[in-house]
Image: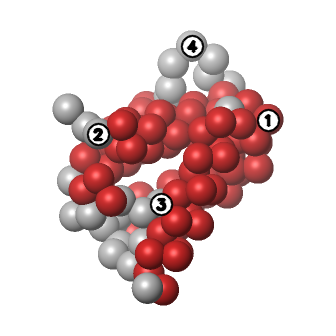
């Protein structure tokens, strides 16, 4: 069972991929096969993060655990979904930004 922090990370990535799939592939009820594969992959990466409960947001992490093609796909999704998160999921977006800031402060110490 993931911690509350990792569960929130799961919700955030699922929301971002869902928004991207709706916006680009016209799917409203479920994800297309490509987006579903990306979500499954991202979920596995979150679950197996070497940082565990202290996981920083992936954008500021020094470890690159995504394989190159998946990293490019998730970066595209996040670039498109990120600005829209503040309107669709303001609480998740705020907490995600807080996690980025907190991780940056943790690295400077």
Q: Is residue 72 visible?
A: no
Q: On the image, numbered disc 2 is attached to which residue?
A: 3
Kind of element beneath mark 2:
loop
Measure how far apart labels 2 and 1 are at the Cα level. Answer: 26 Å
**Are the residues tagged 2 and 4 within 8 Å (C-beta)?**
no
Measure how far apart labels 3 and 2 are at the Cα level. Answer: 15 Å
Q: Earlier in the sequence, mark 1 or mark 3?
A: 3
44, 12: nearer the viewer:
12
Q: What percent of the width, then of the height, locates residue 47?
A: 25, 47
Q: On the image, numbered disc 1 is attached to which residue?
A: 87
Pick the quarter of the image with the N terminus.
Answer: top left
Residue furthest front in the image:
109
Between disc 2 and disc 4, the foreground one is 2
34 above or below 64?
Answer: above
> Which image quarter: residue 107?
bottom left
At x 52% / y 65%, what residue is drawn?
102
Q: Is residue 13 visible?
A: yes
Q: On the image, numbered disc 3 is attached to which residue?
A: 57
The way the protein has been coloured in the rendering is: secondary structure
Kind of element beneath mark 3:
loop
Left or right: residue 27 versus residue 70 is: right
> Which image quarter: residue 50?
bottom left
Q: Residues within 10 Å of mark 4 (few under 14, many from 20)?
A: few
Measure how far apart labels 2 and 4 are at the Cα level. Answer: 28 Å
């Amino acid at each position: 069972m993931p911690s509350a922090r990792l569960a929130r990370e799961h919700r955030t990535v699922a929301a971002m991929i869902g928004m991207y799939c709706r916006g680009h592939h016209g799917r409203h009820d479920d994800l297309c096969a490509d987006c579903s594969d990306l979500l499954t992959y991202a979920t596995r990466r979150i679950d197996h993060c070497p940082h565990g409960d202290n996981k920083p947001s992936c954008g500021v992490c020094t470890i690159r655990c995504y394989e190159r093609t998946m990293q490019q796909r998730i970066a595209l999704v996040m670039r498109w979904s990120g600005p829209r998160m503040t309107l669709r999921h303001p609480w998740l977006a705020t907490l995600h930004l807080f996690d980025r800031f907190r991780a940056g402060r943790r690295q400077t110490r």
